[in-house]
Each structure stands twice: as C-alpha cells, then as structure tokens.
Image (cartoon, rainbow, N blue to C red):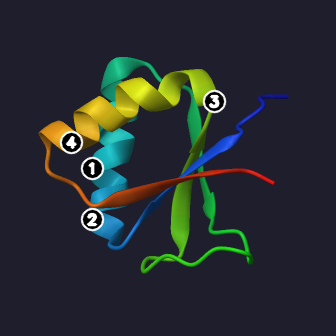
Amino acid sequence: MEQFNTIVLFGQLADLMEAEAICLEKGYRYQIEPVPTWLTAGCGMCLALQNVECPGLEVELRKHAMQYRVESRR
C-alpha cells in the first residue's frame, strides 16, 4: 500500500484538478481524497502524495501561480 504522507490543500476544485493534471504529466504517485477532519480547505478535497514528490509538485504549482497549502499527515 502506498504511503501518502503529504497533503496538498486547495481553495478551489479547479486548482485541485489542475494539480492532478500536473501529477499525471510528471508521473507523480498521488490520490485524491477528502480533506481530513483536522484540516479545512475550500473545495473539501485534497491531493495526497509521497513526501519525496512534493517539492517537484510545488515548483509546478508556483509556475501556475496556484494557491495551495501543504500539510504533513498526522
């Protein structure tokens, strides 16, 4: 089973969908899941991925001027 220990939160579903497209393009392993109850995000869904892939995704999100927040899974 994959160990997705980083959560990326977005304020809008459109941003989440764009981030998913980036993950697919770059070959990052991820899953879309509901935002954990101890966090809040505008769209209610988040990207979960491995810690090692997060820096690469963050570079791409910044290139697209996307608003996001990164949290470690508890």
| Tag nearer the camera, 2 or 3 | 3
* Whether label 4 touches label 1, CB < 8 Å: no
Identify the residue at horizontal 27%, vertical 61% (top origin).
Answer: 67
Q: Which mark is residue 18?
A: 1
* Whether label 4 touches label 3, CB < 8 Å: no
Identify the residue at horizontal 74%, vertical 77% (top origin).
Answer: 37
> Counting residues from the N terminus, which is met first, the one under dot 4 or under dot 3?
3
Above-or-below relation of 34 to 64: below
| Tag nearer the camera, 1 or 3 | 3
> Counting residues from the N terminus, which is met first, the one under dot 4 or under dot 1?
1
Q: Which mark is residue 14?
A: 2
Marks 2 and 3, how far apart in space? 22 Å
Above-or-below relation of 16 to 52: below
Circle 2: residue type: Ala
Residue that mark 4 sits on: 62
Q: Percent position (x, y) of residue 53?
A: 51, 24
> Counting residues from the N terminus, which is met first, the one under dot 2 or under dot 4?
2
